[in-house]
Amino acid sequence: MRALVHSSFGEAEDVLRLEERPVPTPGPGQVLLRVVLSPIHNHDLWTIRGTYGFVPDLPAPAGTEALGIVEALGEGVEHLQMGQRVATGGTFGAWAPYLVAHAAGLIPVPEGLSDESAAQLVSMPFSTISLLQSLDVAEGQWIVQNAANGAVGRMLTQLGAARGVRVLGLVRRAEGVEELRSQGIENVVATDQDGWREEVARLLDGAEPAVGVDSVGGAASGEVLSLLAEGGTLVAFGAMGSPVMELASGDVIFKQATVKGFWGSKVIQQLDPAIRAELFGELIRRVTDETLTLPVAGVFDAADAADAVRLSKSAGRVGKVLLRF
């Protein structure tokens, strides 16, 4: 099979190559999947750069999530069937025509879910609903987040609304407000506009968010922290703008604030199996009834991976970019 591989760390559009690799064989408790679609995530690109929490040995495969069809069952796998559609969100090397995955971690895909939605069901949506669950925000309370027009930001707003949680979104440019409004998402403020803090105060109407989510880093981290209530918690989810968080010590001290990280890969591993199943069930319901939308910006053949990566990095993109195998 011809899989996407990189022999050095760098920008994905520069270092990824299609190379011949043997089709893997499933061992006990594993399944061989024929990959249908696989999304491009920021963490995939950071891994290829060598800047993520997981640094692979070179030459390395790439990609972590996929929709696949069961092609072969390893010894002891009895709950899956040949030809069944399944989703995987934690299998390294997903940017290939075939991959081996642990059967216990696969999510059967119901008939009513499209390939495009199923291909991106696990990593970002499940991380987002796990984040929302961990924040423990009550119905009617507020969360403030930046990168509100990013995939996670949009999903956190939609999932929060479905639970009755109010989400105030910050974006870095005025166009982002209109982009989200066109998708039915309100309570968004552009921080490049004069008077943005006054607009935040108008929307909150005296409420003080107890929790903030930072996916940007840099000065944007401090903007979120500055809006939190005394005793509030700032959660670092990503670092799209800068790997350094710029926080005013006065906000940390006088708000008695807590700053902590959220890494979905670790948190999800520690989830109680019953809660994990419950959250996946909620996700599938929300996608099926379109409470949660998973738009697609484009679908590319693996041979055009460089173009796919460039689109994935483009500003203003709405939806995930998918690779087809």
Image (cartoon, rainbow, N blue to C red):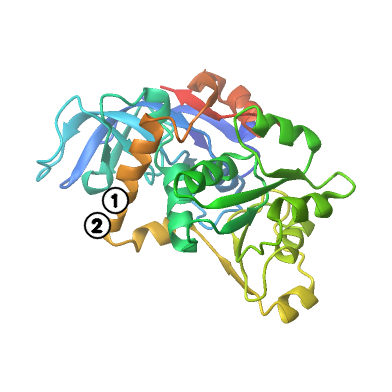
- Residue bearing mark 2: 274
Residue 160 drawn above or below residue 303: below
The residue depicted at 58 percent of the width and 56 percent of the height is 237
Of residue 111 and residue 88, the one placed in the foreground of this image is 111
- In percent of width and height, residue 68 lies at 31, 29
**Image quarter of residue 248:** bottom right
- In percent of width and height, residue 267 lies at 42, 61
- In percent of width and height, residue 62 lies at 48, 39
- Residue bearing mark 1: 278
Of residue 24 and residue 130, the one placed in the foreground of this image is 130
The residue depicted at 70 percent of the width and 77 percent of the height is 255
Direction from residue 268 to residue 197 in the image, left or right:
right
Do the residues under discs 2 and 1 have CB atoms within 8 angstroms?
yes
Of residue 200 and residue 304, the one placed in the foreground of this image is 200
Direction from residue 141 to residue 82 in the image, left or right:
left
Of residue 63 and residue 232, the one placed in the foreground of this image is 232
Could you tell me how many numbered marks the image carries? 2
**Image quarter of residue 72:** top left
Q: CA distance from mark 2 to mark 1?
A: 6 Å
Q: Quick one: label 2, few (<14), some, or many (20+) residues within 10 Å?
A: few
Direction from residue 180 to residue 123 in the image, left or right:
left
Callout 2 amino acid: Ala
Q: Is residue 135 visible?
A: yes
**Image quarter of residue 61:** top left
Callout 1 amino acid: Glu
Q: Secondary structure at mark 1?
A: helix
Where's the C terminus, which quadrant? top left
- In percent of width and height, residue 245 lies at 72, 63
Q: Is residue 214 visible?
A: no
